[in-house]
């Protein structure tokens, strides 16, 4: 496989930028490793509960990981070998993490609007994930409460949100070639628990007009329903 | 609400040094709008009281210098629309007084009105509005150049959705009215000057010796005859230009109506978030308070605040984008033809002026 000089430079640029950002902001460890190859995710999507992760199961899984890590550290201590890692999260930390993840992964309907310059993932009862891209791979927006990084990592769309108080939220969206499905993987991490809680949610395509009417909720107009052909 | 006026310099004639100072001070105002220096507190609940003896036409043009915090095109589009809303707002405040002539919002500073108000929005976040206003007569004389700053308080956001920054516009209008009242009534002279300047811009060789210009100031050397065919044609072209401005004005009025509710909610949400952040910073000093607050409560509050502002911001931005797409085309009926214009407001204005030049060229060869 041959890679054009232009693409190579672009890859180097993206890597350098990702490395620089990593140095400045230690919380962000995710780097863009692949060239952007955007895929079309346009459409309306509804959650498939059967395939999606159960939050309780994910919490149990992370609790088991923490327990295993505690046993490993205890063994190291017994052998006289110290461990210089961060303290393990307690039960209340994990419950906090789970409660936050529940709020963050609450939306069950998505609408993706996409063009060459911008993608908007509108989420029911939450804010839209918006990414504007110019092909350089990484887009950074700074808000009053935090920083958002987004872009295409290969054919996956990612959003990394670093909020105040050490709350980190990552969303990764990918579309399955074989089945008409959208996978949204959300990772939630807090400063006190550097064990991310990862929730995978599968969405299937649906036709909002199939019912013969469509409702939209806006702040200024409230819930507005209209019939469409 | 509390309006603060930053008087940068008194009425002065345009000069390079003054121009440099304008640029320098406008940057200073942008960076430190609260600097003590020569800021004057105008007071609360300011009411428009000024009387203007001369029925001068006023042209408002407005641009935005508000920092695009998110760096997105959506925010940039929103800030452009916000600038138009602020221009509309000032127009509304001026129109409360019947003594003015016609008040229009122009896509860029124009020589058609006898008085131009150029606004630059420096800060706007729902809690604070900082606007620079430069008022010039068509003679080129700078009559006012000030930075106005208004800070909203919680009581300003009431259920009847009145403008939380009403004091700023009232102060500005009062200042403009005071200045115009204190100068000699030169309405007829300024109208002639306006037409000659318009002629020199659109058809430079129309009345070359009639207009005097020295150090950026314009004067009438000779008055053209009222029956001069060129003058009659220029009057008609000027009417066509105003027809375009009025057509755009209608569109802007629609935008203003469509966006005003969402804009109000965004301002309110933005102020709430900024106040909440300040409160958090204050409470951060108090370790006891932090101990009493659970981690979940703090993190949940952070996420909720972020989500709330984003939801308001996105609804507003989407609305602005929708309206921007709708208003990209304008049809103007003039000279027994329908002209279709497209592109941004500035592009349409330039296109229309080029069309007017072509009309003039065609008619002058007949």
Image (cartoon, coloured by chain):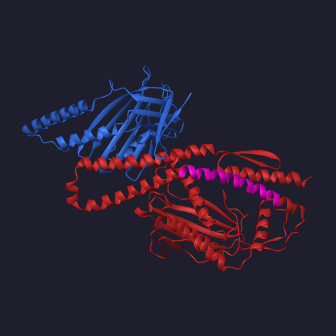
Chain colours: A blue, B red
Q: Is residue B322 above or below residue A145?
A: above
Q: Main secondary structure of the magenta part?
A: helix
Q: Residue furthest front?
A: B160
The quarter of the displayed image where residue B114 is located: bottom right
Report the side of A64 relative to A146 (left or right): left
Query: Residue B146: x percent and y percent?
Result: 56, 71
Q: Is residue B359 visible?
A: yes
Q: Residue at x 29, y 48 (%)?
A: B299
Q: Residue at x 68, y 50 (%)?
A: B347
Viewer-nearest residue: A185 or A24? A185
Specify whether residue B257 is painted magenta: yes
Report the side of B256 relative to A224 (left or right): right
Query: Residue B160: x percent and y percent?
Result: 48, 58
Quarter that holds the N terminus of chain B: bottom left
Segment tinted magenta in the rendering: B235-259
Viewer-nearest residue: B191 or B361? B191
Query: Residue A165: x percent and y percent?
Result: 29, 50
Viewer-nearest residue: B171 or A90? B171
Q: Residue furthest right?
A: B366
């Amino acid at each position: 496989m041959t890679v054009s000089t232009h693409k190579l430079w672009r890859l180097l640029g993206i890597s350098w930028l990702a490395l620089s950002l990593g140095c400045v902001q230690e919380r962000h460890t995710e780097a863009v490793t692949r060239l952007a190859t955007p895929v079309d995710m346009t459409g309306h999507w509804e959650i498939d509960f059967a395939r999606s992760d159960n939050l309780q199961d994910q919490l149990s899984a992370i609790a088991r990981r923490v327990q295993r890590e505690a046993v490993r550290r205890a063994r190291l201590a017994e052998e006289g070998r110290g461990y210089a890692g961060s303290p393990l999260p307690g039960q209340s930390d994990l419950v906090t993490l789970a409660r936050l993840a529940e709020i963050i992964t609450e939306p069950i309907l998505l609408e993706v609007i996409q063009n060459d310059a911008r993608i908007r993932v509108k989420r029911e009862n939450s804010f839209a994930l918006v990414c504007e891209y110019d092909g350089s791979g990484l887009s950074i927006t700074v808000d009053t409460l935090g920083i958002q990084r987004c872009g295409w990592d290969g054919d996956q769309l990612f959003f990394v949100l670093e909020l105040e108080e050490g709350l980190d939220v990552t969303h990764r969206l990918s579309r399955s070639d074989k089945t008409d499905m959208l996978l949204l993987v959300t990772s939630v991490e807090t400063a006190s628990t550097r064990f991310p809680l990862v929730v995978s949610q599968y969405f299937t395509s649906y036709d909002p007009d199939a019912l013969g009417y469509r409702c939209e909720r806006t702040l200024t107009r409230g819930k507005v329903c209209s019939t469409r052909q | 609400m509390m309006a603060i006026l930053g008087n940068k310099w008194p009425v002065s004639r345009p000069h390079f040094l003054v121009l440099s100072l304008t640029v320098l001070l406008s940057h200073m105002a942008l960076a430190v709008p609260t600097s003590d220096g020569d800021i004057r507190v105008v007071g609360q609940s300011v009411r428009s009281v000024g009387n203007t003896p001369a029925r001068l036409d006023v042209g408002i043009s407005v641009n935005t210098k508000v920092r695009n915090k998110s760096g997105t095109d959506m925010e940039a589009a929103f800030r452009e629309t916000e600038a138009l809303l602020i221009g509309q707002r000032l127009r509304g405040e001026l129109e409360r007084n019947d003594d003015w002539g016609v008040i229009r919002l122009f896509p860029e500073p124009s020589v058609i009105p006898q008085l131009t108000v150029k606004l630059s929005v420096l800060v706007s976040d729902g809690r604070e509005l900082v606007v620079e206003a430069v008022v010039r007569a068509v003679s080129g004389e700078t009559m006012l150049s000030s930075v106005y700053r208004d800070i909203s308080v919680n009581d300003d956001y009431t259920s009847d959705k009145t403008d939380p920054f009403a004091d700023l516009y009232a102060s500005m209008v009062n200042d403009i009215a005071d200045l115009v009242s204190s100068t000699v009534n030169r309405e007829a002279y300024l109208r002639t000057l306006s037409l000659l300047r318009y002629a020199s811009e659109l058809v430079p060789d129309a009345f070359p010796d009639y207009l005097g210009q020295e150090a950026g100031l314009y004067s009438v050397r000779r008055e053209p005859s009222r029956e001069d065919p060129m003058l009659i044609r220029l009057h008609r072209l000027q009417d066509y230009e105003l027809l375009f401005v009025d057509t755009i004005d209608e569109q802007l009025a629609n935008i203003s109506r469509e966006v005003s509710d969402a804009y109000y909610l965004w301002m309110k949400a933005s102020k709430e978030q900024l106040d909440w952040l300040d409160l958090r910073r204050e409470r951060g000093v108090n370790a006891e308070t932090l101990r009493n607050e659970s981690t979940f409560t703090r993190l949940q509050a952070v996420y909720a605040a972020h989500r709330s502002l984003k939801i308001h911001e996105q609804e507003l931005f989407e609305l602005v984008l929708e309206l921007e797409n709708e208003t990209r085309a304008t049809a103007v009926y003039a000279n027994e033809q329908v002209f279709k214009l497209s592109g941004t407001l500035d592009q349409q204005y330039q296109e229309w002026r080029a069309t007017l030049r072509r009309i003039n060229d065609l008619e002058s060869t007949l």
